Image (cartoon, rainbow, N blue to C red):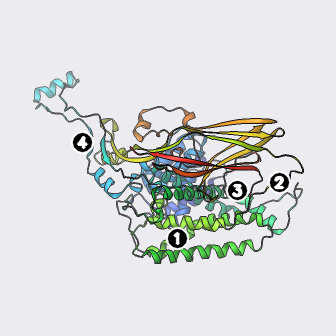
């Protein structure tokens, strides 16, 4: 299965063959990278190849066709493109809703772990994880003949083997946010969705759009009509851009609070190199800090010029932030390409950290870029709107109760069975049942004790609002870390709401997914940070922060895009302290 490209139109969903046909041409022209090339994710051809493989999987008409296409893609395409596309296709297809994809950092550990970890793991041979026969009796010719009459194999003693896993220690003194495996995997998913939606949007902008002339709300001008057409053509792109920017706000907020807790500037922390899937180390830049800062300044200045050109034709200042966010989303790859070219040059077969969307949170240059994009966006933010209630009394937050907030670091083990699986394939022993021990990498991750937040709200009448909670630095409202949003159905008088935040549990490893049967209800996707990062790192003496609670008008959906102007009915601040237990 998967030896030949499935180019039967009947194997794909109705109306999708035109997309598959274009991808088939790319495959026949050898324009889709194979398994053993060094892939730069900033390559001009990468978005189209990623979109093509995603459609090749997502548009298969049924389960057998999907299996066949997945096997072909696994054999013939670069593993990074294949895994990213497969991850999205599994989430989109109805017949794969019950499947659980392993974490990206277990499927492709070379892109998430330091070079030393991968090299150490590759020195472990598969037979170190299997029992070895101590006695191999010499067989006589009579034994061979008798073996046909009695095929049962004689018992042979096996060397006892420990059941505890073979551990490669990758723990650090501090579990930095930018090194968190689940966060980097989450970020990779965000970038993948953004890239695919950009390419889909380019196709849709060239298609004719019919505008219904009998609309309930008239356009305010030509800008509104253009904006409406763009939303119709780029619906998923706008959504994925907002998710990317929401998570950018989260990352900047969490990293700023981590800097306060550790006393270190995270944008200047440099970590050991990673390896590509081809085993080639990523290289660093030869430029000094001042030169890199100058390049970042030029990058942001060029982006700001584009935004200014767009907003000056817009007479409605409330839309400026949305325009700025859209331009940043559209230009994401272009920004990274230009920055990578200026910093790293045009080295052939020399992959750089900026060229890898799976691990660029580890790169101090990329983190600096995110901070500068955040500052640029902040300059277009509008103040929240406080409505004219016309003599009516708005709801009030009369009390906030916060339980003790404590963070800690815990051991996390990552299954490296995929590296051993490659050895089994090479030895033609592709049977994971041979293995009696697991090979794992151990590192620390941040987590938090269970905590709760209670709200007492007084409402003059029945009302439905949205409550949003943020953490921010002392005497600052920005940057801030979004903690929770939920719908509140208020009755007249005093209302009490209690929100519970349990300690995050570890996800099942790759080996556990092979061996266990998980219910479909456990399969969830999230647009937010991993749950173990809900609280920023505390300190032994207590990190002093502010808890901001806002009540806004309920519009039927939870607000994901931090920074958008909303109608705020009430807000209040409370001082909180986050402690950290160091093991």
Give me the C-alpha separation between circle 1 and circle 4.
43 Å
Mark earlier in primary sequence (1, 4): 4
Badge 2 local density, few (<14 within 10 Å), some, or many (20+)?
A: few
Numbered disc 3: secondary structure: helix
Give me the C-alpha separation between circle 2 and circle 4.
69 Å
**Residue 454 in which image quadrant:** top right
User: Is 233 located above or below residue 286 in the figure?
Assistant: above
Mark earlier in primary sequence (4, 3): 4
Mark earlier in primary sequence (2, 4): 4
Q: Residue furthest top?
A: 150
Marks 2 and 3: CB-CB under 8 Å?
no
Give the residue pinned by disc 3: 235
Left or right of residue 181, residue 94 in this image: right
Give the residue pinned by disc 4: 128
Give the residue pinned by disc 2: 387
Badge 4 local density, few (<14 within 10 Å), some, or many (20+)?
A: some
- The image shows residue 144 at horizontal and vertical percentages of 15, 28
Marks 3 and 1: CB-CB under 8 Å?
no
User: Is 521 located above or below residue 372 in the figure?
Assistant: above
- The image shows residue 391 at horizontal and vertical percentages of 89, 49
User: Is 572 located above or below residue 153 in the figure?
Assistant: below
Q: Is residue 5 visible?
A: no
Left or right of residue 334, residue 560 in this image: right
Give the residue pinned by disc 1: 337
- Quadrant of the snapshot with the C terminus: top left
């Amino acid at each position: 299965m998967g030896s030949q490209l499935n180019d039967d139109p009947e194997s794909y969903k109705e109306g999708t063959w035109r997309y598959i046909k274009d991808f088939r041409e790319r495959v026949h022209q050898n324009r889709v990278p194979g398994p053993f090339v060094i892939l730069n994710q900033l390559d001009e051809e990468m978005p189209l190849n990623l979109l093509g493989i995603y459609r090749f999987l997502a548009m298969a008409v049924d389960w057998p066709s999907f299996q066949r296409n997945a096997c072909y893609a696994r054999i013939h395409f670069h593993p990074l493109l294949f895994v990213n596309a497969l991850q999205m296709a599994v989430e989109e297809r109805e017949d794969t809703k019950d499947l659980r994809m392993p974490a990206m950092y277990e499927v492709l550990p070379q892109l998430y772990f330091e070079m030393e970890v991968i090299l150490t793991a590759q020195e472990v041979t598969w037979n170190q994880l299997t029992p070895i026969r101590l006695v191999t009796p010499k067989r006589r010719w009579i034994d061979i003949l008798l073996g046909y009459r009695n095929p049962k194999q004689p018992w042979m003693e096996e060397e006892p083997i420990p059941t505890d896993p073979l551990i490669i220690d990758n723990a650090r003194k501090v579990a930095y946010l930018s090194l968190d495996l689940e966060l980097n995997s989450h970020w990779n998913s965000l970038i993948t969705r953004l890239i695919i939606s950009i390419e889909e949007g380019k196709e849709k902008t060239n298609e004719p759009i019919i505008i219904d002339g009998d609309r309930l709300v008239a356009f305010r001008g030509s800008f509104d009509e253009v904006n409406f057409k763009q939303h119709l053509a780029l619906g998923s792109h706008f959504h994925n851009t907002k998710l990317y920017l929401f998570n950018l706000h989260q990352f900047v907020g969490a990293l700023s609070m981590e800097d306060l807790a550790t006393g270190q500037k995270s944008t200047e922390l440099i970590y050991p190199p990673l390896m590509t899937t081809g085993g080639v180390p990523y290289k660093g830049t030869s430029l000094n800090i001042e030169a890199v800062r100058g390049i970042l300044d030029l990058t942001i200045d060029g982006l700001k010029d584009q935004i200014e050109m767009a907003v000056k034709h817009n007479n409605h200042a409330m839309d400026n932030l949305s325009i700025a966010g859209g331009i940043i989303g559209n230009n994401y790859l272009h920004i990274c390409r230009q920055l990578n070219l200026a910093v790293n040059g045009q080295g052939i077969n020399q992959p750089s950290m900026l060229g890898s969307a799976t691990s660029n949170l580890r790169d101090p240059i990329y983190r600096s870029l995110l901070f500068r994009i955040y500052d640029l966006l902040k300059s277009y933010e509008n103040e929240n709107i406080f409505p004219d209630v016309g003599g009516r009394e708005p709801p009030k937050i009369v009390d906030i109760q916060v339980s003790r907030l404590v963070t800690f670091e815990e051991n996390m083990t990552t299954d490296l069975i995929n590296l051993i699986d490659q050895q089994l394939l090479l030895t033609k022993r592709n049977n994971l049942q041979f293995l009696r021990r697991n090979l794992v990498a151990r590192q620390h991750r941040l987590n938090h004790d269970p905590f709760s937040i209670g709200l007492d709200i007084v409402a003059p009448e029945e009302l439905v609002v949205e409550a949003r909670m943020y953490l921010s630095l002392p005497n600052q409202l920005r940057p801030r870390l979004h903690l929770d949003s939920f719908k509140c159905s208020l009755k007249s008088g005093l209302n009490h709401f209690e929100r519970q935040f349990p300690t995050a549990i570890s996800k099942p490893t790759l080996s556990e997914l092979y061996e266990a049967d998980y219910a479909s209800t456990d399969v969830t996707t999230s647009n937010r940070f991993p749950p173990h990062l809900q609280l920023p790192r505390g300190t032994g003496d207590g990190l002093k922060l502010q808890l901001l609670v806002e009540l806004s008008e309920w519009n039927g959906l939870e607000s994901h895009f931090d920074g958008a102007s909303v109608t705020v009915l009430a807000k209040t601040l409370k001082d909180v302290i986050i402690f950290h237990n160091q093991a």
